[in-house]
Amino acid sequence: MLPVVGALLLVFVGNGDGRRNALVRWITLIVSVAVFAVTLAMWAAFNPGSPEFQLVERVPWIPAFGIDYYVGVDGISLLLIVLTGFLTPIAVLSSWIGIEKKVKEFCIFLLLLEAAMIGVFISLDLFLFYVFWDAMLVPMYFLIGIWGYDQRIYAAIKFMLYTMAGSVLMLIAILGLAYLHNAATGTYSFDLLKLYTLDIAPRTQFWFFLAFAVAFAIKVPLFPFHTWLPDAHVQAPTAGSVILAGVLLKMGTYGLVRFAFPLFPEAATYFAPWIAVLAVIGIIYGALVAMVQPDMKKLVAYSSVSHLGFVVLGICAMNVNGMQGAVYQMLAHGVSTGGLFLIVGMLSDRRHTRLISEFGGLKAVMPRLTAAFMIITLASIGLPGLNGFIGEFLIMLGAFRWDPRYVVAAGLGVILSAVYMLWMFQRVYYGKVTHGENTTLPDLLPHEWGSVIPLCAIAVVMGVFPTLFLKPMEPAVTRVVERLQNTQTLRVSNDARNAKFKMQTRSEVK
Amino acid sequence: MISPQLHAIVPMLSVTLAALACMTWEAFRDKSEPDQMPVGALGIVGLIGAGISAAFLWNGNAASFGVVSGDNFGLFVTLVLVVVGILTIMFSSQVITRDGIPAGEYYTLILFAIAGMIMMATANDLLVIFIALEVLSLAVYVLTGIRREDPRAIEAAFKYFLLGAFSSAFFLYGIAFTFGLSGSTHLDRVGSYLAAQSLSDNPLILVALGLLLVGFAFKISAVPFHMWTPDAYEGAPAIVTGFMSTGVKAAAFAAFARVFLSSFEPFSADWAPIVWVIAAATMILGTVVGVAQSNLKRMLAYSSIAHGGYLLVGLVAANEVGKAAILFYLAAYAITNLAAFGVIALLGARDRGNDELRDYAGLWQSHPALAGLMTVCLLSLGGIPPTAGFIGKWYIFSAAVSAGYYGLAVIGVLTSVISVFFYLRVVVMMYMQERGTEAPRIHVSAVSMTALSLSIAAIFYLGILPAQVLNLAAQSIATIF
């Protein structure tokens, strides 16, 4: 079912004609909308009651190593795919006018990126997952490097190297897992479900978990690994930022939920408090740094660090509420931050600056854009009734059941987020028009309506009908959590066994 | 039809005959006629003959005169070499006309070199390996300096020749010791002799081992025997560099693997730690120094040193996966690297190489197709999916992991990240920098374009559907080790 998406893309690549930019844009838009329709059709075909992977396809790829083209979705990945399908047409629309040179190549890279992102979310074979994971870097690198702002080359290389440095260590861990599977059963396998059943020694788990977690933490980005993000975000073209914030960052948290935690439950239990501490630091640090940014895009970028901290915190809580909240927050953040970057991009396309001080009083000049920005801002802050609230609330609930101390710190983050977002909003839109050139800026253009309306609509829908999204993911989340909690109890009995074993050896020595 | 004794050397004969034919053709050719492609076409015919005969010999385990064995391992490398040869000739057709290189001599030398390489890959006797080594080396020394008017080429050829001769002496000395110990130069007999020995009884084994190791390390330009590589690679015409960095390396690795993984296998516990260190040093030095280069050829020279290091990882791992990984990696690397040098060669001009990094600024604007092809090659060299280079690296590292060499695998992946940095510098130049001056228009002939398209297709084929070739590689090692 999904390879159709890839095929569509390839057909497009053959058709592209550099001289007819409008045609290329339309084709891209149609393709991406069609992909979105396909993802919605998947949702329709999806049975929300089952925790199992559905719509599974399996074709042997490299049989000698047990590598298959093995794809399928459960509730978690399904929603993320829908998010990807949703944001890509918006990204296309956002570059409708802003991108003038090499339109065809831009569109090709954008669609390749979409294919790779979907690939990451649907892979159930670790090798396949890694291929998509790394392949995705290339189009993103070009998007930032060619169509970005003035510091783009530095940002693009930094993005690429940071991500690769993390992911190659994960590659080793993946190979190690396949090797362990070989040692245990006699065949190599990269099949995620088979690897779930492996019994891995705690020491090995420790190292493998670290390798996976670092790769994902860089992508998220978790606090000390976040430095690539402001650069990449700020320098990327609007479409790149939307995709980067909307989908790419989710790959890190998705990886934690799908791979790092369930594959190495014992190590995960061991590391969870430490990761949660980093997440909380990220929440507060991201918020504080965002507050003082003079550049709107940078501000939104740091707000991502803060919001993704919440997601990681929810994952670390390792209970149903926290996990669900984390996944929900992933979706919500994709929509709201995607929207923020989109509108900031519109402003910077008009004025060719992103400095907050260059704006002011825009409400009088462009009331419609202001209204849209208001909705998205409130969604990002987590106002009840909009999408951000549900996720944050569930995460806090989950974290509270785990350890209330984290919630106190995270709550501070919520308040700070209101501070920096509203402060920016106030400085940009309220007050008097301080710069003469701002008086003549046009309000929303037709193609911008096309991208803003769905975003605002979905923000409201997600805030008002959360069940629509929570229900399909629930069985899958429950399964992950059960797996983690089983090991927690198992570990207790293990400890007892180990203690017994130690005593035995001691008595033998005697 | 042919005596079974000759079967295993048919591929070699085919290439040699083509070489002789080229020589004859050149002697009787009408020199006023500028078109030199027919000479190259002769070579391609010979190479295709070699390829077909190798395909026929597959699974046959033919042996000629007890010293050349047509086992699958040798045949796999032969096929890689045939591909290298064909691509080289196709790229060369345009380049040598432009640079005024005498076609007959050039193609003859290329073909003799390939004949030597095939011999080296299939030889089963230390002395034959040595003869093959000399055949190919002499041809390559001359090829390096074939642009006689260029002082850099002369310097490169001379350096390469002196150090090459030096390493040959080491290698020969190693053979002498081995012969002195075991009374034979035949690999099987050496192997069965060594299997019954222990190092404490016979410390001389270590001397023989060490000398052979040095000889091979020179040829595959492993650290610390890599000094000649950057100079030789930079001075030689780009296409010859591509040929050297792939063909010579493939042949030398084949012989290296054969000698060390069969005859000297009993002492692997003694040589594995040494090769471990060499592999790590080679990967690290190749990438780290590569970062500092501003000349593309020199940069790729260091990158090819690093790739030698990755191949050594497979050798250290020395398990089933590792041996097959060496073969697959050789194939992937040979095609990728040759195509990259092909692009460099095409972009050069007679009076100037155009191989500084800044010459590539804005290539995307002036030659989008070449820039795109070059990008694919560089990404493949960097090991980014879905290209051949990624599968090769993955295969090598899975060998290391399954043999328990986690440290080596970690060094390997980290250096490959560093290497991505300098490959990306070229991409940055091509796509994201504007060219100050007007770029010279370069006409790419149909033959060169075909060769490039074929290599790119092969890179993606090996990257996306590697199962077939992986199986072949796995079969190849089943016969000898």
Image (tube, grey):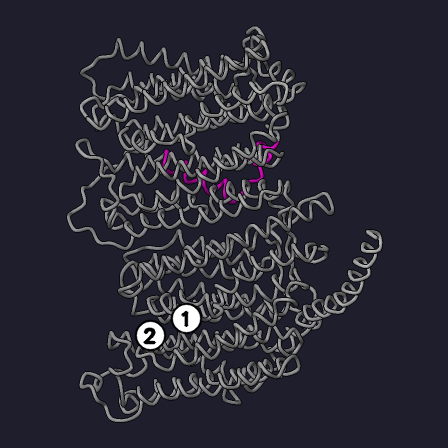
In this view of the protein, which residue sits in the foreground, A276 or A89?
A276
In contact (CB < 8 Å): disc 1 and disc 2: yes
In this view of the protein, which residue sits in the foreground, A162 or B289?
B289
Q: Residues within 10 Å of mark 2 (few under 14, many from 20)?
A: many
Q: Residue at coordinates 24% horizontally, 26% vertically from top-left?
A: B153
Q: Amino acid at mark 1?
A: Val
The subunit carrying tag 2 is A
Question: Image check: A424 left or right of B27?
Answer: right
Q: Residue at coordinates 28% horizontally, 88% vertically from top-left?
A: A362
Quarter of the image with the N terminus of chain A is bottom right
Q: Which residues are magenta?
A: B451-474
Could you tell me which secondary element the residue under label 1 belongs to? helix
Residue B23 image offset from top left, x and y in percent: 31, 11
Q: Is residue A385 above or below residue B106?
A: below
Question: Image check: A318 left or right of A410?
Answer: right
Number of on-image labels = 2
**Tag 2 residue:** A345
In this view of the protein, which residue sits in the foreground, A180 or B58?
A180
Q: Quadrant of residue B245?
A: top left
Q: Is residue B390 above or below residue A194?
A: above
Residue A220 disc label: none
Query: Residue B452 colored magenta?
Result: yes
**Tag 1 residue:** A242
